[in-house]
Amino acid sequence: MNPTLRDLGTHTNLDELLRPSTPELDLNQPVEGAPPTPEIEVARSTTDPFQVNFAAVDIAGKLHNSRTGSGMKLFALVFVGGPITIFGLGVVAAAWSNPGLGVVRLLFATLLGLLMAGFWPYIIFANRRKNSRSS
C-alpha cells in the first residue's frame, strides 16, 4: 500500500465513517392544517350598513346644491345625464315610429321616455336647497 494512503488511514477515524447509518425517519405523519383565516371587516365611515346604496343619492344631493360649480353640473349633465337622456328620447322616437302600438302603450312609452330624458337635467338644475330663515 502506498505510504501516503497508509498515513491518511491512521489519521482518519474509519470506525465513524463505516458505522451503519441511523434508521430513517418516518416522514409520513399527519400535519396540522393552517389556522382558518379570520373574516375581514370592511372599513366603514359610518354605522350605516347600507351606505353603499346611498352613494347615488349623495351625488345627486351635491349636484343640485347651489354652491356646486357650473362646470361640475355640465360634466354631470353630459357624462351621466347624456346617455340616459338620449335613451329616453330614443324610447319616445321608437314608440311614435311604430304604427301598430296601441294608444295606451304609446302614451306609456312616451311618458316613460320623457321621464327618463328629463330626470338628470331636473336633478342637476333644480336648486331645491334654499336657506331657511329662522325667526
Image (tube, rainbow, N blue to C red):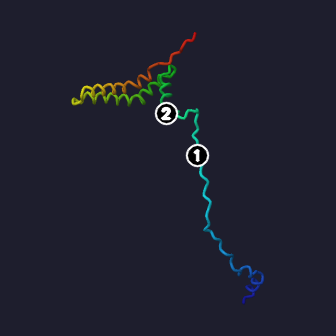
Q: Quadrant of residue 23?
A: bottom right
The tally of labels here is 2
Q: Nearer the viewer, residue 16 or 27?
A: 27
Quarter occupied by the N terminus = bottom right
**Residue 44 falls in which quadrant of the image?**
top right
Q: Decide which of 123, 54 is in the foreground and name it.
A: 54
Instruction: Determine the CA span between mark 2 and mark 1.
Output: 22 Å
Whether residue 95 sits left or right of residue 11 in the image: it is left
Work out whether 96 lies above or below 23.
above
Nearest the eye: 135 or 95: 135
Quick one: SS at disc 1? loop
Q: Residue furthest top?
A: 135
The disc placed on residue 87 is none
Q: Which mark is residue 53?
A: 2
Q: Nearer the viewer, residue 108 or 22?
A: 108
The percent coordinates of residue 66 (x first, y second) are 50, 19
- How crowded pointer 1 is (Cα within 10 Å; few <14, some 14-19, many 20+) is rated as few
Element at badge 2? helix
Question: Label 2 neighbourhood size at 10 Å, few (<14), some (14-19), many (20+)?
Answer: few
Q: Judge whether 67 appears above or below 29 on screen.
A: above
Residue 134 placement: quadrant: top right
Residue 39's tag is 1
Where does the C terminus fall, quadrant-wise? Answer: top right
- Of the residues shown, which amino acid type is indicated by label 1? Glu
